[in-house]
Amino acid sequence: MSETPENFETETVADAPAPAPASAPAAAAPAGYSGSAPRGDRPPRRDGRGDSRGEGRGEGRGEGRGGRDFRSRRKVCAFCVDRGRIIDYKDASRLRRFLSDRAKIEPRRKTGTCAKHQRRLSTALKRARFLALLPYTGIHLRNADRGA
């Protein structure tokens, strides 16, 4: 039959360890694993982002990795700011600012005009095009710059 080795001790029910309470972790974490370690015990991040407390970021604006702050600033409508400024289809030099290099009407997100003035601006640009004050295509824009 099976014999037990000489140095083998058998445990009795009284010698058995007590079961762990339900609130204690079931198994210990492997060595070198700090998954549940508090945030203060972690080494600093290597990618420069820091943690949620602001570490790794510049103290003031623009003091990050690149040194520049690229947060978008809210554009204001030039026509709302200057109340006396009206949108006139005959003022081609002012309207030309709202055309792209390909003579397309620039969108609101780029020029910053409000919806009301963007509608009036597009109507004025179309009228100026119809009367040949402004070009329909970018080729005419480039030719006008060379010739004049």
Image (cartoon, rainbow, N blue to C red):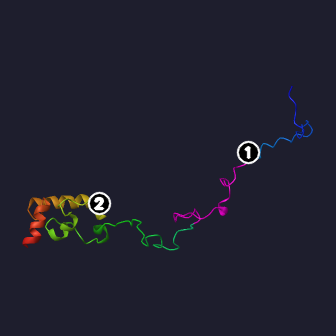
Q: Main secondary structure of the magenta part?
A: loop
Pick the residue in front: 34 or 2. Answer: 2
Q: Earlier in the sequence, mark 2 or mark 1?
A: 1
The disc at residue 67 is: none
**Closer to the camera in the image, 66 or 119:** 66
Residue pictured at 73% horizontal, 45% vertical: 27
Q: Position of residue 98 (x, y in %)?
A: 22, 65
Could you say which disc has been placed on residue 108 in the image? 2
Q: Quarter of the image containing the C terminus? A: bottom left
* Other-residue count near label 1 (Cα within 10 Å), few / some / many at <14 / 14–19 / ≥20: few
Q: Is residue 95 magenta?
A: no
Query: Three-letter amino acid code at disc 2?
Result: Arg
Badge 2 density bin: few <14, some 14–19, many ≥20, Cα 10 Å: some
Q: Answer left or right for 95 relative to 49.
A: left
Q: Is residue 45 above or below residue 20?
A: below
Q: Which residue is mark 1?
A: 27
Residue 59 placement (x, y as % from top left): 53, 73
Residue farthest left in this picture? 147
Q: Residue furthest top?
A: 1
Task: Indicate yes or no whether the magenta region holds residue 51.
Answer: yes
**Amino acid type indicated by mark 1:** Ala
Q: Quadrant of the N terminus?
A: top right
Q: Which residues are magenta?
A: 26-53
Observer able to see residue 123: yes
Q: Quadrant of residue 15?
A: top right
Rendering coords of residue 68 (x, y %): 42, 71
Q: Left or right: where does residue 145 sit relative to residue 98?
A: left
Q: Which residue is drawn at the image coordinates 73% and 48% (left, top)?
A: 28
Rendered location of residue 101, percent (x, y): 19, 64
